[in-house]
Amino acid sequence: MARLPDFEGLAIFAKVVELRSFAAASSELALSKATVSKAVSRLEERLGARLFNRTSRRLALTDAGHKLAERAARLLADGEATESEALAQSATPRGLVRLAVPMTFGIKTIAPLLPEFLAQYPEVSIDLHLSDATVDLIGEGFDAGLRIARLPDSSLIARRLCDMPRYTVAAPSYLKRHGRPTHPMHLAKHKCFGYAYLSTPGVWHYTNAAGEQVSVRPAGQLRVNNGEAVMPALLAGLGIADLPEFIVGDAIRSGDVEVILKGWKQPEGAVHLVTPPGGPRPARVEALAEFLTKRFAKGKKRGA
């Protein structure tokens, strides 16, 4: 197996050539003179050629040293430029953020916020991926994602942005024809719409004030992989749905649907920003995280 080039030795050699002194190079690089000398000696041994002719008063490049010096200097300059660019990227919001967001929440809530963010950070661009499926942030190369649920234990780093309650609802026309359930177990006798990406697919969980817990497996004519797709059938009075506030809130407020099972609550959900684990987040990702945190905090104060 081929060995990697001795990049450190080449960089130290280039610095010695630039400053014409081992002592000056060790001072600028904050290395001991012995470390600088050993790095050059190691490079000479690896290349099988002397790079300097050294006397107590003079340091001169050999023919082999002259041939190597220009390329080593270019390597050092490229390395310094690459590191400077990376540091600038980490310090100043710049570059692409790949963001995964549930479909309807992304269209209704996140997309309207992006013009303000993009205007505020003109050197940042967003690749917005909309899907209700839970994406593999690390495996699929995303910088961040929004999750609307109770988060399972994972290695992802999560920041809670806001609460997101769920409601069990039906249109008045459905309730008039089929009656109003007063206990979650009554749902077994009703037509209910299913959603593919629940944390426990096909099962709805409820708790009341007395601490009683009930899990039901309702059934019906329609199952979807996007909650918004339930709304036409729900408004037409064809069944009961369990939906988050961002999808069904307007219909509740307008009276087009009614909340049922009011004495029972679904497990508390929330909107979380999740990012892969590791070192400090790039400035572009941190800027987006801070922006969303502030915007959702403002929404809470307005009662949104």
Image (cartoon, rainbow, N blue to C red):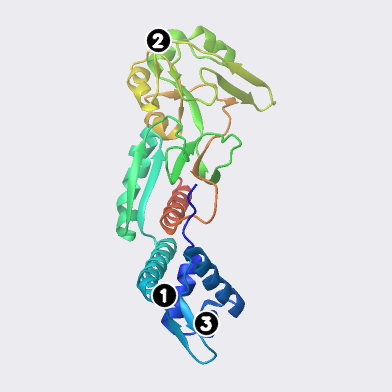
- Looking at the image, is 168 positioned above or below residue 134? above
Could you tell me if the residues under marks 3 and 1 are in contact, i.e. CB atoms within 8 Å?
Answer: no
Q: CA distance from mark 3 to mark 2?
A: 81 Å
Residue underneath mark 1: 65
- Tell me residue 201's x, y (percent): 51, 20
- Tell me residue 126's x, y (percent): 33, 48
- Looking at the image, is 3 positioned above or below residue 230? below
Secondary structure of the residue carrying tag 1 is helix
Q: Would you identify the image quadrant in which residue 234 lies?
A: top left
**Kind of residue sitting beneath label 3:** Phe
Q: Would you identify the image quadrant in which residue 255 lies?
A: top left
Q: Nearer the viewer, mark 3 or mark 2?
A: 3
Which residue does the image show at 54% across and 68% down from the upper left? Answer: 42
**Kind of residue sitting beneath label 2:** Gln
**Kind of residue sitting beneath label 1:** Gly
Q: Which label sits on residue 22?
A: 3
Q: Which label sits on residue 221?
A: 2
- Tell me residue 91's x, y (percent): 44, 65
Q: Nearer the viewer, residue 12 or 46?
A: 46
Mark 1 burial class by Cα count in 10 Å: few <14, some 14-19, many 20+: many
Choose the circle earlier in sequence order: 3 or 2.
3
Q: CA distance from mark 2 to mark 1?
A: 80 Å
The residue sitting at the bottom extreme is: 57
Could you tell me if the residues under marks 3 and 2 are in contact, i.e. CB atoms within 8 Å?
Answer: no
